[in-house]
Image (tube, helix red, strand yellow):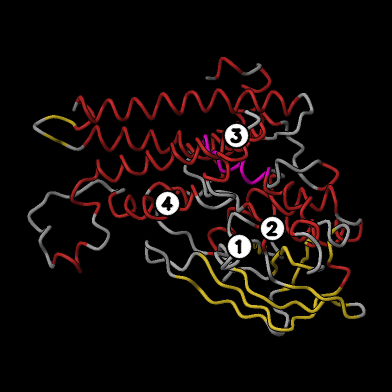
Amino acid sequence: MDMSFSSEDQDFRAEVRQFLKDRLPSRLSEKVRLFQELTKSEMEEWHAILNERGWLAGNWPKDFGGAGWTAIQRHIFEEESALAHAPRVLPFGIAMLGPVLQTFGSKAQQDRILPRILNGQDWWCQGYSEPGSGSDLASVKTTAIRDGDDYIVNGQKTWTTLGQHANWIFCLVRTDPAAKAQEGISFLLIDLTSPGITVRPIVLLDGNPEVNEVFFDDVRVPVENLVGEENKGWTYAKYLLTHERTNIAGVGFATAGLAALKRIAGSQISGGKPLLQNPLFAAQVARVEIDLMAMATTNLRMLAQAEAGQVPGAESSMLKLKGTQIRQAINDLTRRAVGPWALAFPSEALEGANDDLPPGPAEASGATRAFLNNRKLSIYGGSNEIQRGIIAKSLLGL
């Protein structure tokens, strides 16, 4: 695929590869390769390394402290980082809130918040979903009632990813209960250390408390923390979700996952020969590889449009939809390739039943975790069913 890039882009790719070789700690890349959970301090460590190089916020303009990369350069960096098993850059501050503040935030908000995102002083999380408002975000019920120079916030957010580590949350709140659904919503920044906030973890299928419930009980939030205009939050929310859905496509993650799948399937023996030589399994791997190549081509088309100044629309829904399906298919094939070692808790469940088996691949213990955890890909950022509706309405006129 390198043939699609200019000589300048090829030089940039080489620069990124060298940087990853020189600065990416092997203990971090090994944990990522083995699908192991990173600690907060490990995520912050990679964040600081990238920020020191000026490469943390590739999507930000230089005027705001970003790298000012082109869409092609961002694609190259994300792809090479995934192939090198670098920790992902957490999207909440960099990819989501940052662009919203740069476009709709006040100068005071930009000057106060953006540098703190870059230097790691603030860890942001996303307060969109509620128990009764998942993909239908227009139905949010968390309220923010004006009281002098403050809003009084009451309600609950759920599925708040890594909220246990965060000290700030950006929220969709209802500031005009009498208005039509989308017209009464505002975008509010809330300090999670404020009195009246409770964060409660939710343990997922893979055994980790990655997501949380966040409860607001008469929480006072300064009016200066309102982004843009009151009751215009739906506009900002849609802007953020367009960026989120494009990132969810995960071409780089899928490419790295496919390479790992081929490596594992090439080492596991089935019927006296490597599993990758099994015609049925090889056909399934080929199918997902073809789908990935087609998605990568579509992604490059979108990058070319972005370079020309066009804003992604329903195309981002297409990438989100197909990208999540491909990554889940790769996770499923990897889990199957690992075979009996894919059991999540073999020592507790089988009481030594695996003792007579030869050692499994190093990725075995994490393959099931990745499979289980990434079931969420087709739900968050707007479920795949919602994306199909957007595509049908916007592109097909249905």
Tag 1–tag 2 contact (CB < 8 Å)? yes
For the residues labelled 1 and 3, the Cα–Cα distance comes to: 22 Å
Estimate the spatial distance between the alpha carbons at disc 1 and disc 4, rounded to whole Å: 19 Å
User: Regarding mark 1 in the picture, which secondary structure is present there?
Assistant: loop
The percent coordinates of residue 388 (x first, y second) are 55, 39
Q: Earlier in the sequence, mark 1 or mark 3?
A: 1
Q: Which residue is mark 4?
A: 375
Q: First in sequence: mark 2 or mark 3?
A: 2
Give amino acid for label 2. Answer: Ala
The residue identified by callout 2 is 138
Q: Which mark is residue 133?
A: 1
| Left or right of 86 in this view: 340 | left
Looking at marks 4 and 2 on the same chain, the residue that comes earlier in the sequence is marked by 2
Q: Amino acid at mark 3?
A: Ala
Q: Residues within 10 Å of mark 2 (few under 14, many from 20)?
A: many
Report how far apart the C-alphas of labels 4 and 2 lie in the structure.
Answer: 24 Å
